[in-house]
Every structure is written in C-alpha cells, then in structure tokens.
Image (cartoon, rainbow, N blue to C red):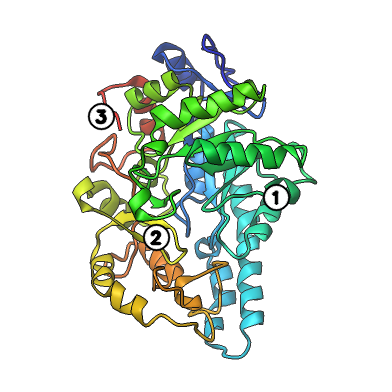
Amino acid sequence: MSASSPDSSHVDASHVDAALASKLQRSGLKPLNLGGRQLLPIVQGGMGIGVSAHRLAGAVAATGGVGTLSAVDLRRHHPDLMARTQGLASRVGQDADTRAAIDAANLEAVAREIQAARQLSGGRGLLAMNVMRAVSDYAGYVKRSLEAGIDAVVVGAGLPLDLPDLAQDHPRALLVPILSDARGVQLIVRKWERKKRLPDAIVIEHPRLAGGHLGAAKIADLNDPRFDFERVIPESLAFLRSAGIEKEIPLIAAGGIRSHADIQRVQSLGAAGVQLGTPFAVTEEGDAHPEFKRVLASARDEDMVEFTSVAGLPARAVATPWLKAYLKIEQKLQAVAHVKNRCTKAFDCLAQCGLRDGLAGWGQFCIDNQLAAAMRGDLKKGLFFRGVGALPFGDQIRSVRDLMDRLLSGEPEGLAA
C-alpha cells in the first residue's frame, strides 16, 4: 500500500471508468493508490440512516472512486426488515429482546446492501463501510461488514483504537480512521503499530467545513487553526516520514471540498485524495428522498447551524423548522435532563446518549427519529446534516457521473474552501 508518487498520472482502466480515467490523466490531478488499485482521487463520504446506501455507493465505485455505505439503521431501506421490527419499541419490559431484534435486522441489511452495491459497481472502484465509533453495536457492524466482503471499513465519531482487533481475521481488508489533527494521527498510528497493523489510509476531516458529527471536542474548537489542512496535512506527513511510513498511509482530505481547484490545493499540500459528503448526498443516485436532496442543495452557508448532538459531539446541519424549534428550548431540556428508564425506541443506537443517559450539555432528542425523518424528506421533523460551501451544481440534482466529471474537469472553477 502506498500513496501516489508526485509524477504518477496513469490510471489502471480495469478499476476506473475508461472515459473518467482519460479525463483524470488530463486533469493535472494524481490518482489515489489504495488497496492495490489506482483509483480516481475521490472518496464519497458515509452518511447515516440510509442516506448513503447501495445505490449511491455502488454508483460511485462504478466510476472508479471509493463508494461508501453507512452502517447505521440500514434496515430502513428494506420493508421486510422494517415490518419485522415494527412496534417492538412499545413492548415495555422486553427491551433486550427488542434491541437484539433491531440489531439483527440492521446486520442483515448491512450484508444485503454490500451485495447490492457490489453488483452495481461492476468490479470497479472500491466499496467502504462507514461505522461510527459512538454507536452501541459498533463492533457488530464492523464484523458483519467484513464478513460480507466489504473492501474497507472507515470509522469516525471517536477513536477506533480497537479496529485492528475487530479485523484481525480479515488481514486484506482496508482500515481507515477519520481524524482531524496531527495529534490524532500520531496516537492512532502508534497504538495500531503495537497491534501489528497500520491504517491503510487516514481521512483528515476539517470540523469547520464538514457536515454531520464533527471531529472537535466542543463547538468553540471548530475554528481552531490546528485543524486547517495547511497545517494538519504537512504535520501528519512529517510524522509519517519520521516513522518511515509516509508512502504507506495516504491522507484523504475531507470537509468543504467542492471543486477541481480544491482537489488540486489539498494534493499540493500532500493529500492523496479527497472525501466529499454533501455533493454526493444530493445526486440522483443518492439513497435519500428527493425532498432531502432539495433541502441540502438549496441551503446556503448562512442557513447552517452548529449544535451539540445527542452523541455529545459538535454537529452541523441545516436550520430547518424542527432544528430551530429544538434549539429554542435546548437549554430548558438540558436543565431537566435525567436518566431515563429506557431508550425512546428501545433501540439504544448510541453507546452514550444525551437523552437516554441524562447527560446535561449533550443533545436532548432522539437522533434516530430525526435523521430517519430527514431521509424520508420530512422537513417538519427531520435533522438535515450538511457541510458548508456552495455545491458544484448549485441547487441542481445531477448524477454521480456528472459530479465526477465536474470534479475532474475543473469547469467551472469552484471556490476553494
């Protein structure tokens, strides 16, 4: 495994759509070397509660990029699995059975979605599964994804110190942590080295620019200069160089990437590729409802708001009616936060939950309810995560192929993040 060399421009067309491979060679961008394949230097970010499922991930991989599914609550794309778990949350006193049934349905959905994405990919690109470290069945999602043949496991929303242990029976699977600063890179590499494993790539996500859960301890830290790509990428590369592993661990910049110029900029800093979430979420192949895509595509930076999630992490989303109403009473809800007898849905999706565990200062809402409503396009109830920056096609909903073409062609020039 090695990062792309500075003069590397040839792409193996067996893993990349031929027309896009040709376009990459003319683009001035470098390919991404990952998993023994030369790919387009574009990774689609994982977006939970069904936003990035098999249609989106399969379409991205088919072009020669990295398509990413998100493991959390994928059963929502499978009517039979939803029917199997319908009404279970109302069975007071049987919470353990309810959680087991929902977890089993979600793990079955993980395997189904990987198989469906693989068929759509046509053997091109790579397929990844994004798993939040903060979810309660994190280990189960990782193991089932690996058993189902996923190419890579990407973990954010917490430090995945134990990921090499969970993947010890799958030495060929790629393991990719999401981090935000050079200190995190050093910590993960040193901890994993003791387990005889190295990250196969590291996603460097800027919390001031990304959407969803953000890699900072608190909202006040989002603008800390230690997260700037101009600082964290060179610092991380310097550490990897000192450890003699610079060529083994490509860095992938995430957050606010919107254009060919943005990709050129971070590659000039030493990144091997980029990860984008929101621009892929609003594509025709995106697995969420058309109204979900409309809300994200039409939102402007002034429509964004940062708040503390129920997972205890800073988060960024569109200031929709539900979120505005919640934020008006957030402090009152936090003031009376207390431990609940049971999870609202007897699902216990998070290992630690501000609402269930009565954690003052954390979010006080059911994140599964609100994200699922957004995926269905429910503007009145949904929580719509989004990153900052105007999208490549403005408020238009275009195909994955169009987006890849735009990012590689550089026409028209986008605004650097």
Kindly report the distance in space between the C-alpha atoms of the residues bearing marks 3 and 2.
28 Å
In three-dimensional space, the C-alpha distance between marks 1 and 3, rounded to whole angstroms, equals 39 Å
- For disc 1, the neighbor class at 10 Å (few under 14, some 14 to 19, many from 20) is some
The kind of secondary structure element at disc 3 is loop
Q: Secondary structure at mark 1?
A: loop
Q: Nearer the viewer, residue 54 or 308?
A: 308
Name the residue furthest bottom: 93
Q: Nearer the viewer, mark 1 or mark 3?
A: 3
Q: Residue furthest right?
A: 169
- The relative height of residue 43 versus residue 352 in the rendered view (above or below) is above
Which residue corresponds to mark 3?
415
Q: Give the quadrant of residue 12.
A: top right
The image's mark for residue 375 is: 2
Q: Which residue is mark 1?
A: 148
Residue 337 visible at all: yes
- Relative to 413, say whether 221 is above or below: below
Amino acid, disc 2: Met
Q: Residue at x 34, y 62 (%)?
A: 383
Q: Position of residue 343 (x, y in %)?
A: 52, 79
- The mark nearer the N terminus, 2 or 1, is 1
- Report x, y in % for residue 314: 39, 56
Look at the picture and state if 163 lies above or below 309: above
Q: Earlier in the sequence, mark 1 or mark 3?
A: 1
Q: Quadrant of the N terminus?
A: top right
Name the image quarter holding the C terminus. Answer: top left
Q: Residue at x 25, y 29 (%)?
A: 415
- Which residue is more in the foreground, 332 or 309? 332
Indicate which disc, 3 or 2, sits on the residue closer to the N terminus: 2
The three-letter code of the residue at mark 1 reads Ala
